[in-house]
Image (cartoon, helix red, strand yellow):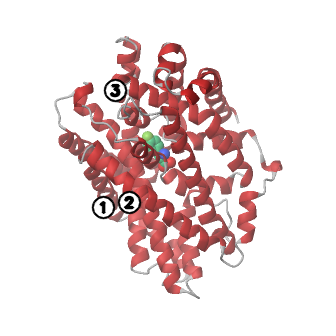
C-alpha cells in the first residue's frame, strides 16, 4: 500500500493542509460568539491552555495513528491492532462522523457565499443597519437559495478533493491559508481602529476571573477540540499522508500555533467592531451573520467604499476558512471509499457529493435537523472519538512504537527529550480531561 499512496510534499505542505483543516468556521464563526457568551478574556486563556495541554497531545496521537498505519481512518485502528474485531468496528465511527459534520458545515459555507454576494452587490453596506441585520433571517426562512448555496459550496469542496492529495488539497491550502491570514489581519486592523473599539480590545485582553465557571472550561475545551479538527478522522487521514521523514511534533505544534493565532486574530477582527457598534457580545451563533452585517452597514455611512471592501474581505475569509476544513472532512470519506471499495477518487467524490448534498439539503431547509447534526457531532461524537484515539495510542499501541513515530526512530532529539511529558499527557491528562468535559456538560 505504501508505494501507491500519495504524500504531502514537505513540512510546509503538511502544516498548510493541517492548518487548513483546523482553521475554519470554528475560528471565525464559533470562537468569537463563544468568547462573547463566556466572559471574553477568561475564555481565551482557558482555550489556549486546553489547546496546549489537551488538544495538542490528542492531535499528535491522531497523526501517529495515521502515519503509522498509512491507511484510511476506518482501517487504521484495525490494522494497528492486528485486525482486532472491536477496533475494526470502532473504525467506522471516524468515517461516519465527518460525513455528518460536512453536511451541516457546508450549509454554513453556503450562507457565507450568499453573504459574499450580498457584500458585492452592496445589499449590506448600501442599506440601513436594521435591514442588514435582518438579511440572515429573511434568507434562511423559506426559499431554495440556502440549498443552492450549500450545493455550490459542497461542489467546490469536492472539486478540490477530486484533484488529489498533492495537486488538489496541498496546492489549494498552500495558496489560500496565507491569504486568509492577510485578510484577517487587515480586517482586525480596521476593526481596532474604529471609534469606540477600545472597549472591545480590553474585553479580549483583560481577564475578569469572576466570569470563570466550570462551564467556561468545558466550553473552551470543547471549542479547542473542534477547532483542532479532533475526533473526526481528518487528522488521522491527513497523518497518513505525512512522510516518514517529517517531524510529527513540529508539524503538530505549527498547526496548533496557526489555529490559535487565527482564532485570536478573528477575535480582534470582530469584538472591537461589535463594541464600536454598541452590540451585545453574547448574542450567540448569529453573531457573524446578523451582527457583522449590522456593523458594516453602520460603518458605511461615513465610508461606503471602505466598509464594502471590508465586508467582501470578511465573507471571503469565512469561505476560504470553511472550504479548507470541509475538504479535510470529505477526504476522510474519499480515502475510505478508495481503499475499501473499488471506487476511484473521482467516483468517491461524486458519491459523497450525493450523500452529503442530500443530508445537507435537509439541514438547509430545517433548523431542527441542522441542530441535531451540529449538536450530536460536535458536542458528543467528537469527544467519543478523540477519547478513543488517545486511549488507543496510550494503552493499545506499544510505548516503543509511539516513541518510534514521534522521534523518527530516535533520530529527532527535541521530540525524544519531550517524549515522557507528551506520553504522560496522552495517556493520563487528555483522557481525564475529556471525561471531565462530558461530566460537566451532563451534570451542569
Ligand atoms: N476545525 C474546523 C473548524 O474549526 O471550523 C472544523 C472541523 C474540520 C472539525 C474538520 C473537524 C474536522 F475533521
Q: Are circles 3 and 1 on residues that touch, CB within 8 Å?
A: no
Q: Residues within 10 Å of mark 1 (few under 14, many from 20)?
A: some
Ranked by sequence position, the earlier of labels 2 and 1 is: 2
Count of all numbered marks drawn on residues in the image: 3
- Residue at x-position 38% and y-position 11%: 84
Q: Residues within 10 Å of mark 2 (few under 14, many from 20)?
A: many
Ranked by sequence position, the earlier of labels 3 and 1 is: 3
Residue 148, numbered circle = 1
Quarter of the rendering containing residue 129: bottom right
- Residue identified by numbered label 3: 70
Q: Nearer the viewer, mark 2 or mark 3?
A: 3
Viewed as shown, does residue 166 lie left or right of 238?
left
**Is residue 48 at all visible to an observer of this figure?**
yes
Q: Nearer the viewer, mark 3 or mark 1?
A: 3
- Residue identified by numbered label 2: 110
- Residue at x-position 41% and y-position 62%: 111
Ranked by sequence position, the earlier of labels 2 and 3 is: 3
Q: Secondary structure at mark 2?
A: helix
Residue 241 lies, in percent from the top left, at: 35, 35
Q: CA distance from mark 2 to mark 3?
A: 33 Å
- Residue at x-position 62% and y-position 33%: 54
In depth, the one of 329 and 118 nearer the eye is: 329
Residue 72 lies, in percent from the top left, at: 33, 29
Amino acid at each position: 500500500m505504501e508505494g501507491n499512496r500519495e504524500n504531502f510534499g514537505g513540512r510546509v505542505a503538511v502544516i498548510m493542509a493541517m492548518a487548513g483543516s483546523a482553521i475554519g468556521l470554528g475560528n471565525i464563526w464559533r470562537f468569537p460568539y463563544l468568547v462573547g457568551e463566556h466572559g471574553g478574556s477568561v475564555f481565551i486563556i482557558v482555550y489556549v491552555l486546553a489547546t496546549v495541554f489537551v488538544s495538542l497531545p490528542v492531535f499528535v496521537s491522531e497523526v501517529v495513528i495515521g502515519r503509522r498505519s498509512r491507511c484510511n481512518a476506518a482501517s487504521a485502528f484495525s490494522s494497528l491492532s492486528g485486525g482486532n474485531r472491536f477496533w475494526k468496528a470502532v473504525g467506522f465511527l471516524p468515517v461516519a462522523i465527518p460525513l455528518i459534520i460536512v453536511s451541516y458545515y457546508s450549509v454554513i459555507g453556503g450562507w457565507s457565499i450568499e453573504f459574499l454576494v450580498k457584500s458585492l452587490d452592496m445589499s449590506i453596506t448600501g442599506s440601513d443597519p436594521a435591514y442588514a441585520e435582518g438579511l440572515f433571517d429573511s434568507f434562511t426562512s423559506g426559499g431554495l437559495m440556502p440549498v443552492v448555496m450549500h450545493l455550490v459550496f459542497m461542489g467546490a469542496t469536492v472539486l478540490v478533493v477530486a484533484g488529489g492529495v498533492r495537486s488538489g488539497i496541498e496546492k489549494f491550502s498552500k495558496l489560500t491559508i496565507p491569504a486568509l491570514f492577510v485578510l484577517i489581519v487587515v480586517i482586525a486592523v480596521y476593526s481596532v481602529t474604529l471609534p469606540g473599539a477600545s472597549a472591545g480590545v480590553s474585553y479580549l485582553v483583560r481577564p475578569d476571573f469572576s466570569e470563570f465557571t466550570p462551564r467556561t472550561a468545558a466550553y473552551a475545551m470543547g471549542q479547542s477540540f473542534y477547532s483542532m479538527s479532533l475526533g473526526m478522522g481528518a487528522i488521522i487521514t491527513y497523518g497518513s499522508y505525512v512522510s516518514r521523514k517529517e517531524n510529527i511534533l513540529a508539524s503538530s505544534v505549527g498547526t496548533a500555533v496557526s489555529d490559535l493565532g487565527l482564532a485570536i486574530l478573528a477575535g480582534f477582527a470582530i469584538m472591537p467592531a461589535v463594541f464600536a457598534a454598541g452590540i451585545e457580545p453574547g448574542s450567540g451563533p448569529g453573531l457573524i451573520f446578523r451582527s457583522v452585517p449590522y456593523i458594516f452597514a453602520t460603518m458605511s455611512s461615513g465610508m461606503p467604499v471602505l466598509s464594502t471592501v471590508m465586508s467582501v474581505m470578511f465573507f471571503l475569509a469565512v469561505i476560504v476558512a470553511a472550504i479548507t476544513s470541509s475538504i479535510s472532512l470529505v477526504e476522510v470519506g474519499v480515502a475510505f471509499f478508495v481503499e475499501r471499495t473499488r471506487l476511484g477518487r473521482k467516483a468517491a467524490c461524486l458519491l459523497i457529493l450525493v450523500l452529503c448534498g442530500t443530508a445537507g439539503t435537509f439541514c438547509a431547509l430545517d433548523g431542527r435537523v441542522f441542530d441535531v447534526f451540529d449538536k450530536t457531532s460536535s458536542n458528543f461524537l467528537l469527544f467519543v472519538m478523540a477519547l478513543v484515539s488517545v486511549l488507543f495510542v496510550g494503552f493499545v499501541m506499544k510505548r516503543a512504537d509511539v516513541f518510534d513515530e514521534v522521534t523518527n526512530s530516535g533520530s529527532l532529539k527535541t521530540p525524544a527529550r519531550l517524549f515522557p511529558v507528551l506520553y504522560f499527557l496522552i495517556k493520563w491528562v487528555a483522557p481525564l480531561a475529556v471525561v471531565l468535559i462530558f461530566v460537566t456538560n451532563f451534570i451542569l
